[in-house]
Image (spheres, rainbow, N blue to C red):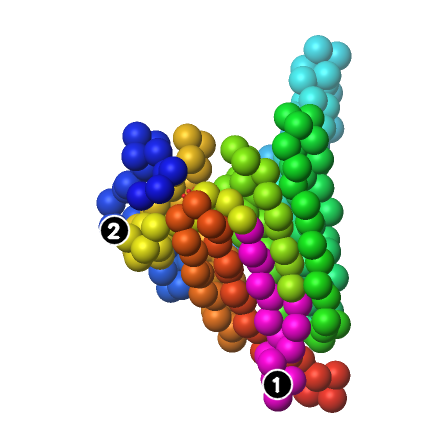
Amino acid sequence: MGNINNNNINDRETNDVISIENYNMITEVSEETFHDLKNLLATISGLTQLTMLKNQSEEIMTYLSSIIEATSDFTRVLNNYYDCTIGDHKQKEAYVLYEIIDNAIVLVKHKIRSFDMIKKSLCLNLDIQSLSKVFGYKYKLKQCFLNILINAIDSMEERGGTLTVMVYNNSSDTYVNVDIIDTGSGISEENIERLFKERFTTKCNGTGLGLKIAKNVVENHGGSLKITSKVNQGTKVHISLPIYNDCELE
Ligand SMILES: Nc1ncnc2c1ncn2[C@@H]1O[C@H](COP(=O)(O)OP(=O)(O)OP(=O)(O)O)[C@@H](O)[C@H]1O
Ligand SMILES: [Mg+2]
């Protein structure tokens, strides 16, 4: 098992696996919950405003104003959550895949820089040969690449290394491929088998969901995700997504 620490392996029950069906169901339930919460908040705010119209003491008016303020803060938090997660469903559009990956890279730059502080080097190699577009949910795709990049960087925490990101089309220009390659700790064959079957993690604070979510997102976009790895040498995550042509009907 190479340098994976057995004591940290958090091997949860196999029935914890999130299937695409479960993932879609969770999204649907979240959407309904979001909707219901917004209605309830509007009711609380409306009733509070009505109560304020009935000559209340100054003290009670202050409390009622605070309730209205809290409900509007709550609504703002909910809207923000919605925009970042569930609402992304409403924004299925054509995006240059590399731009999404670049957005994700920006979010891990601080992690890359932190290697300097511990006097280890993490070198980032970008090999961008394709600016092809994909059609889908930007936020979800960004999260998918973010999960994979974070895993790659985490795997090099002890020794530093090289993170390579390659974007290129297949020979018939029907798929855009992304390879995210690290020279980190690697994953044993036995553990690769477990990655998508159970909530497998070797991290103290890991959920063991990052890769499953990434795979679900890619598959929901008509693509595929494959992992190859060698213990102590590194890991390659290969993603392939269908290219979107501007002349296609949306
Ligand atoms: N690039 C990688 N190099 C080495 N091990 C990896 C790599 N990617 C994933 N792994 C292994 O697979 C496990 C599962 O990864 P996954 O992203 O699903 O969850 P996690 O990273 O443990 O938790 P979370 O994503 O919630 O932080 C990791 O704990 C790690 O052991
Ligand atoms: Mg992860």
Mark 1 / mark 2, whichever is N-terminal: 2
User: Mostly what secondary structure, the magenta segment?
Assistant: strand
The residue type indicated by label 2 comes to Asn
Q: Residue 2's x, y, as percent? A: 35, 42
Label 2, on which residue?
A: 15
| Relative height, residue 225 to residue 187 (above, below) | below
Which residue is labeled 1 in the image? 171
In the rendered image, is residue 246 in sight? yes
Q: Which quadrant of the figure has residue 7?
A: top left
Mark number, residue 115: none
Mark-to-mark CA distance, 1 and 2: 40 Å
The quadrant of the rendering that contains the C terminus is bottom right
**Residues rendered magenta in the picture:** 167-182
Q: Quick one: 189 or 58, which is closer to the camera? A: 189
Among the 4 quarters of the image, the one containing residue 81: top right
Seen at 74% across and 88% down, the residue is: 247
Local SS, label 2: helix
Q: Quadrant of the N terminus?
A: top left
Q: Position of residue 82 (x, y in %)?
A: 62, 49
